[in-house]
Image (cartoon, rainbow, N blue to C red):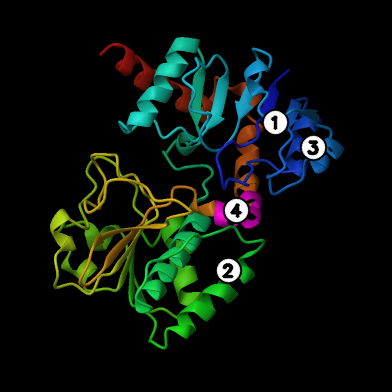
Amino acid sequence: MTHLWVRAESRPNEDRVGITPEGVADLIARGFTVTVEDSPRRVLPTDAYARAGAAIAPEGSWPAAPDDAIVFGLKELPDDGTPLRHRHVMFGHAFKGQPAGQALLRRFAAGGGTLYDLEYLTDEEGRRLAAFGYWAGYAGAAVSLKAWAAQQRGGICGPVRAYADKDLLLDELRAQLDATGRARPRALVIGAKGRVGTGAADLLVAMGAPVTRWDMAETAHGGPFPEVLAHDIFVNAILAQPGAPVFVPATAAAPGRALTVIGDVACDPASDFSPIKVYDRTTTWARPVLRVADRPPLDVMAIDNLPSMLPRESSLDYAGQLLPVLARLDRIEDGPWVRAGALFQAHRDRLTQT
């Protein structure tokens, strides 16, 4: 019998969850055992999971879960260096050479566990089976507009927060833009045909901002891309990966540009493959932008859990996409799960052999 253990998220400002109570009931009807940790922050209440038939465990108790349990979460585990003996389903951010990811792989190697990275659950053609991309793009474009509005006031973007629903975000953002007394900024979205780019463009259109949409055809020549610097806002929706072109070189921070805000939704500044070279670290909810130049200002937004700004919409959307994949956990040596496991093993072995 497959045992899915849904852990509470330990990261601040992380209220999302990857399975709904209805999803839990579906898995139980298929013969799964499901344990859900209590969490006062999760956007969906614990008692709804209990009513769906899940066993409820204390928050953070997953290290003591049975050996055969598959531990399911979204974001980082507590960074305490302990060996990891379970099979974990999560976003590991460990396969592109990131320092924190290398440390995570060493923990799995030490404990004998396995990472099934949610980013790499794919079909036979390599297409992702579930992603938070739409709401990441939506929220990332919103924060980028907030940063632009703050610049018009002569300041820098202040802390951001979660919203009970997207309409509250839209109302607040519209008021901030209207208060500038200026025309809406011109925005460029690269990766506009993907989930992230679609979400970003939808938010910008909802706010009345003119949007230029680029995808593979417009970037195939490999650069340089002076058009990026001719827009007020650039939203990057392209993942860092080998062969990715550089959209914003380090020299772009110099004067002589219209660009004042970069929304790096696909933020991966620690990767050598990052297409944006003017910054070197992610930003936070408390400090959502990094100012990398003045006169004119250039602010980079690179928050790596943007969908948590809209935890209800993003959780319901993602959980609906992922449930058919979770339902195949009883065949973990087949299909997307075996592909994700093999990728982990290759990276773990490469790390331990060096």
The amino acid at mark 1 is Glu
Where does the magenta region start and end?
308-316
Secondary element at tag 2? helix
- Where residue 98 appears, x then y in whole percent? 33, 33
CA–CA distance between discs 4 and 2? 14 Å
| Alpha carbons under labels 1 and 3: distance apart | 21 Å
Disc with the residue nearer the chain's start (2 vs 1) = 1
- The quarter of the picture where residue 312 lies is bottom right
Q: Nearer the viewer, residue 14 or 324?
A: 14
Mark 3 or mark 4: which comes first in sequence?
3
Q: Is residue 156 left or right of residue 139?
A: left
User: Could you classify mark 3 by the number of other residues whose Cα lies within 10 Å: few (under 14), some (14-19), or many (20 or more)?
Assistant: some
Identify which residue is drawn at 51% across, 60% down: 160
Sooner in the amino-acid sequence: mark 4 or mark 1:
1
Cα–Cα gap, marks 4 and 1? 22 Å
Q: Which residue in the protein does label 3 denote?
A: 25
Residue 311 in magenta stretch? yes
Q: Which numbered tag is attached to residue 169?
A: 2
Provide the residue designation for mark 1.
59
Q: Amino acid at mark 2?
A: Leu
